[in-house]
Image (spheres, rainbow, N blue to C red):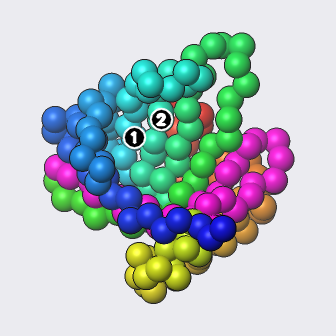
Amino acid sequence: MGAVTTPQLVDVVDTISGVRSYSSGGTRTLSSCDVERWGLRIEHPTPEDPFSDAEVTWLMPELGVRLTTYRARSRHARGGPSVLSAVRVERDHRHWQTTDLLLGLAVPGGTTARIVRSEEFAAAVAGRVLRPGDADQALRTVHRTLEELSNVNHNLTSWLTWHGIYDTWPPL
């Protein structure tokens, strides 16, 4: 059975109203939304998820990545990997539009990062859902980021510091 081709996922964060809108038509009210010198930091609750309490996302447009983690509901639960996704970010004084390029890295911490969503990416390229320029950008971004992570032993904090981002990941 072949991979299912899905349309590109686009979301828009309105930094004034603190709302994240998805291409599916859904919206989320953000519990935090902060423009930083390196990008945008957002967080929102995930009441429908039985395992996580909140999603934390950092958009880093100059690196072409979105960094996401989920806070576990139980303090005893083991957290999942952080995910670095290749994205295209367009922004103005109020809106940050993110187009998911359907390829990323799972960074579990303490072990090697691995490429994720490659089947979905391949199906999107074959189905012409992903433009050639976006596909090329996704491949370059993911491979560059994987190489950079390998240079710092797959440590996200060290990778962020290397890029001049001194904030703690994952956030407390």
- Residue farthest along the top direction in this orientation: 75
Separation of disc 2 and disc 1 at Cα?
Answer: 8 Å
Name the residue rendered at 45%, 45% in the picture.
58
Residue 74 x/y as whole percent: 63, 13
As drawn, the label of residue 56 is 2
Residue 125 x/y as whole percent: 51, 79
Q: Is residue 71 above or below residue 85?
A: above
Quadrant where the N terminus sits is: bottom right
The disc labelled 2 sits on which kind of residue? Val
Q: Is residue 124 left or right of residue 17?
A: right
- Residue farthest along the bottom direction in this orientation: 132
Residue neighbourhood size for the residue with mark 1, other residues' Cα within 10 Å, grouped as few (<14), some (14–19), many (≥20): some
- Name the one closer to the observer, 42 or 44: 44
| Residue 134 lies in the magenta-colored region | no
As drawn, the label of residue 7 is none
Please state which of the two labelled residues, at mark 2 or mark 1, is closer to the viewer: 2
Q: Secondary structure at mark 1?
A: strand
- Name the one closer to the observer, 125 or 53: 125
Using the rendered image of the protein, determine whether residue 172 is visible from the camera's viewpoint. Answer: no
| Contact (Cβ within 8 Å) of mark 2 with mark 1 | yes
Q: Secondary structure at mark 2?
A: strand
Q: Is residue 118 above or below residue 134?
A: above
Residue 76 x/y as whole percent: 71, 13
Residue 92 x/y as whole percent: 19, 59
Q: Residue 72's quadrant in the figure?
A: top right
- Residue at numbered disc 1: 41
Using the rendered image of the protein, determine whether residue 4 is visible from the camera's viewpoint. Answer: yes
Query: Reading the chain from its start, which is encountered first: label 2 or label 1?
Result: 1
- Residue farthest along the front direction in this orientation: 1
Residue stretch rendered in magenta on the structure: 94-119
* Magenta-drawn stretch, dominant element (helix, strand or loop): strand
| Residue 99 lies in the magenta-colored region | yes
